[in-house]
Image: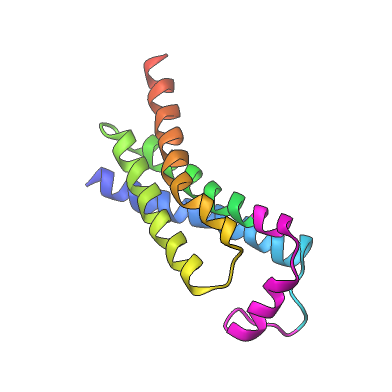
Amino acid sequence: MRNVIAVVVGLVAGMAVNMAIVMLNTKVLFPMPEGLDWEDKEGFAAYLGTLPWTAFVVVIAAHLGQSFFGGLVAARMSKNKPMLVALIVGALTMIGGLMMLNSTPHPTWMWIEVPLYIVTAWAAGNLVITSRTSL
């Protein structure tokens, strides 16, 4: 039961990191036009078309931050399966990322992030395991 809770808490923590970085991107770095709503698919697509590639790099950082930080939190909470819970968080984050990439317009090169969700979650789990064995 503890590992299930670790996955849920890791997902929530990772989502908080993701949303903080995305909000920084859309409110400070590359503000959305006044009155544009996330639900306005056409307006949002037009806005995305005006963004430089650096805005999308920030989005990738948000997504990978979600996978890493969520995996890290889950792994730290797990007593006996830190790598497993970290990878579950990474896999669920990857599913969410795939859904997002399929639902909103993005440059094709952004698909490079998909396998990196698992890599960053693995790195988080490995960090926890390494820190536990070095004590």
Near-viewer residue (31 or 8): 31
Of all residues, the one furthest to the front in this rendering is: 108
Give the color scheme: rainbow, by chain, secondary structure or one colour. Answer: rainbow
Position above or below: 106 against 35: above
Near-viewer residue (124 or 5): 124
| Left/right of residue 80 with respect to residue 41 in the rendered view | left
**Residue 50 lies in the magenta-colored region:** yes
Number of numbered labels in the structure image: 0
Q: Residue at position x 61%, y 49% from top?
A: 61
Near-viewer residue (131 or 32): 32
**Residue 21 lies in the magenta-colored region:** no
Question: Does residue 40 appear in the picture of this structure?
Answer: no
Q: Position of residue 91 (x, y in %)?
A: 36, 51
Position above or below: 88 against 46: above
Q: Position of residue 98 (x, y in %)?
A: 44, 62
Of all residues, the one furthest to the left in this rendering is: 1
Q: Residue at position x 61%, y 63% from top?
A: 107
Q: Residue at position x 71%, y 58% from top?
A: 53
Main SS of the magenta segment?
Answer: helix
Which image quadrant is residue 94 in? bottom left
Q: Quadrant of the C terminus?
A: top left
Question: Does residue 59 appear in the picture of this structure?
Answer: yes
Q: Position of residue 93 (x, y in %)?
A: 42, 55
| Left/right of residue 12 with respect to residue 82 in the rendered view | right
Q: Residue at position x 38%, y 21% from top?
A: 132
Q: Position of residue 129 (x, y in %)?
A: 38, 25
Residue range in magenta is: 35-58
| Left/right of residue 76 with respect to residue 22 in the rendered view | left
